[in-house]
Image (cartoon, rainbow, N blue to C red):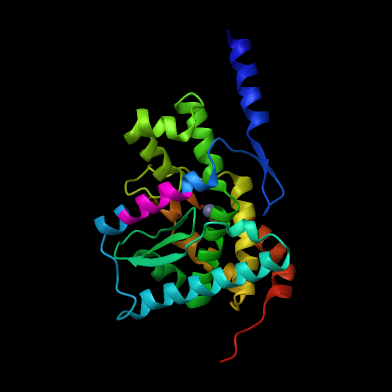
């Protein structure tokens, strides 16, 4: 029985592994990107109505979040259009919102639905560091790390069922898996850390995207040092899922020369 089960899993794995355009890595994919984007639209709307959204027309911080996000999104589009990989951003309808929440957190759902929590701004402290975080979160989304985690969760917790079936039969559980996969937790321990490999990918591409958008990628080093200093016993949100340690900072420094090649400072 066990043998049949592992054979089944193996089959699922081979049938549903796709090569990611951004990273070139093969990923488990039991859910389609378009299904996830549809689900993201609903979850994003319900998150925004359940939280206090800061008005980007009257608040400088919220305006900054929108500005940085829009610049990064435009840079990514130019980059992948230039590579003939326009499909990386298929279905994307970007939205960037700042919500009033003391937690230091930020995330990007599939399809480009981004939220930054006000609590993160005391650690980013400047626009370039915010670009580093948004670049990182957007890299997780377009490298489809969330769908990889969602697929793993469907396999492990709901027996490898497809998303529509899971949604129809176990809507609450499926919604919970989705929110966990994208880091939209509001309680301690509700957020699954991304794997080391996914973190390294997001750091690398996030650095490049921030640089392409005109933000100095070198701000990443002091930012992650501030993250390390902010990390304490009460780690929630971004701090808990993004441990800042020497090896992360070393890897970021190793990618810096390449990032600097992409960096075109904005004209003042
Ligand atoms: Zn991350």
Give whichever of 266, 90 is nearer the camera.
90
Quarter of the rendering occupied by the C terminus: bottom right
48 to the left or right of 216: left
**Residue lying at 52% horizontally and 71% vertically, measured from the top left:** 131
Instruction: Give x and y (percent) for residue 165.
Output: 43, 30
Q: Is residue 249 above or below residue 66?
A: above
Residue 158 percent location from the top left of the image: 45, 26
Residue in the picture at 65% in, 67% down? 208
Q: Relative to 87, does residue 148 appear above or below in the rendering?
A: above
Specify whether residue 42 is in view. yes
Asked whether residue 39 is drawn in magenta, I would say yes
Q: Quadrant of residue 267?
A: bottom right
Q: Where's the N terminus, which quadrant?
A: top right
Q: At x 37% / y 76%, what residue is drawn?
A: 61
Residue 266 quadrant:
bottom right
Let me know if residue 257 is in the magenta part: no
In the picture provided, is 45 more to the left or to the right than 148?
left
Residue 234 in view of the camera: no
Q: Main secondary structure of the magenta part?
A: helix
From the viewer's perspective, is 155 left or right of 171? Answer: right
Residue positioned 47% across, 62% down in the render: 93
Give the magenta part as a residue range.
37-45
Question: In terms of image quadrants, where is residue 252?
Answer: bottom right
Q: Where does residue 258 sit, x and y in percent of width and height?
A: 74, 68
> Relative to 149, does residue 83 appear above or below in the rendering?
below
Q: In the image, is residue 170 above or below residue 55?
A: above
Residue lying at the far top in this picture: please name it.
1
């Amino acid at each position: 029985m066990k043998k049949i089960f592992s054979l089944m899993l193996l089959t699922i794995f081979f049938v549903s592994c796709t090569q990611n355009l951004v990273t070139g890595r093969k990923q488990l994919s039991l859910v389609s990107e378009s299904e996830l984007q549809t689900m993201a639209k609903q979850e994003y709307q319900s998150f925004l109505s359940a939280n206090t959204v800061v008005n980007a027309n009257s608040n400088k911080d919220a305006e900054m979040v929108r500005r940085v996000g829009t610049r990064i999104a435009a840079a990514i589009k130019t980059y992948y259009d230039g590579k003939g990989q326009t499909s990386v951003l298929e279905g994307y309808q970007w939205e960037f919102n700042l919500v009033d929440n003391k937690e230091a957190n930020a995330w990007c759902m599939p399809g480009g639905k981004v939220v930054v929590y006000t609590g993160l701004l005391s650690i980013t402290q400047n626009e370039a560091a915010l670009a580093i975080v948004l670049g990182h979160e957007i890299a997780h989304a377009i490298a489809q790390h969330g769908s990889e985690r969602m697929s793993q969760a469907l396999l492990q917790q709901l027996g490898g069922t497809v998303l529509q079936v899971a949604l129809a039969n176990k809507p609450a559980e499926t919604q919970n898996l989705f929110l966990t996969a994208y880091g939209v937790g509001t309680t301690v321990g509700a957020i699954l850390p991304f794997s080391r490999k996914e973190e390294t990918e997001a750091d690398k591409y996030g650095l490049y995207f921030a640089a392409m958008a005109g933000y100095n990628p070198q701000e990443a080093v002091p930012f992650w040092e501030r993250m390390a200093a902010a990390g304490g016993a009460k780690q929630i949100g971004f701090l808990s899922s993004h441990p800042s340690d020497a090896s992360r900072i070393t890897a970021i420094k190793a990618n810096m020369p390449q990032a600097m090649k992409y960096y075109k400072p904005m004209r003042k």
